[in-house]
Amino acid sequence: MRPRQGAPLLRGMRGEAACDVAALATTVQRIGSLLAAQPEIQEIDLNPVTVYDAGEGVLALDALIVTNAPNGRKTS
């Protein structure tokens, strides 16, 4: 993952430790796998996501998953 504007923050700057980019990438990959395995999921919103120092992981502080109900209506 190399976001254009956020990359310096993830790599560590101004004496800050580098963030756990591997854990962030794993999280994004797992969300993608979940979406592929569960087609009824219409959207997932994780906000905010805290990325800790390298080797310490990530934490989604809040999550919303929107699905299609059997009748075709969206539910959350």
Image (cartoon, rainbow, N blue to C red):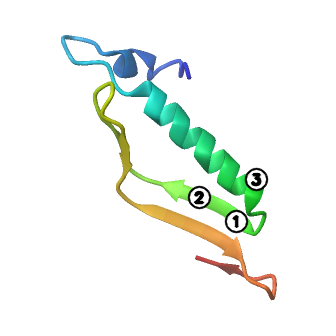
Question: Which of marks 3 and 1 precedes in the sequence?
Answer: 3
Give the residue type that dot 3 points to. Answer: Ala
Pointers 1 and 2 in contact (CB under 8 A)?
yes
Q: For marks 1 and 3, give the one nearer the viewer.
A: 3
Q: Secondary structure at mark 3?
A: helix
Pointers 3 and 2 in contact (CB under 8 A)?
no
| Residue under label 3 | 36
User: Can you say whether 8 is above or below 64 in the image?
Assistant: above
| Residue under label 1 | 41
What x and y, as percent, mark residue 46? 48, 54
Give the residue type that dot 2 points to. Answer: Ile
Residue 57 occupies which quadrant of the picture?
top left
Q: Is residue 62 left or right of residue 43?
A: left
User: Can you say whether 26 is above or below 54 in the image?
Assistant: below
Q: Residue at x 34, y 25 (%)?
A: 19
Please state which of residues 35 and 74 is positioned toward the viewer in this rendering. Answer: 35
User: Can you say whether 37 is above or below 19 in the image?
Assistant: below
Q: Residue at x 39, y 60 (%)?
A: 62
What is the C-alpha distance between the residues marked 1 and 3?
A: 9 Å
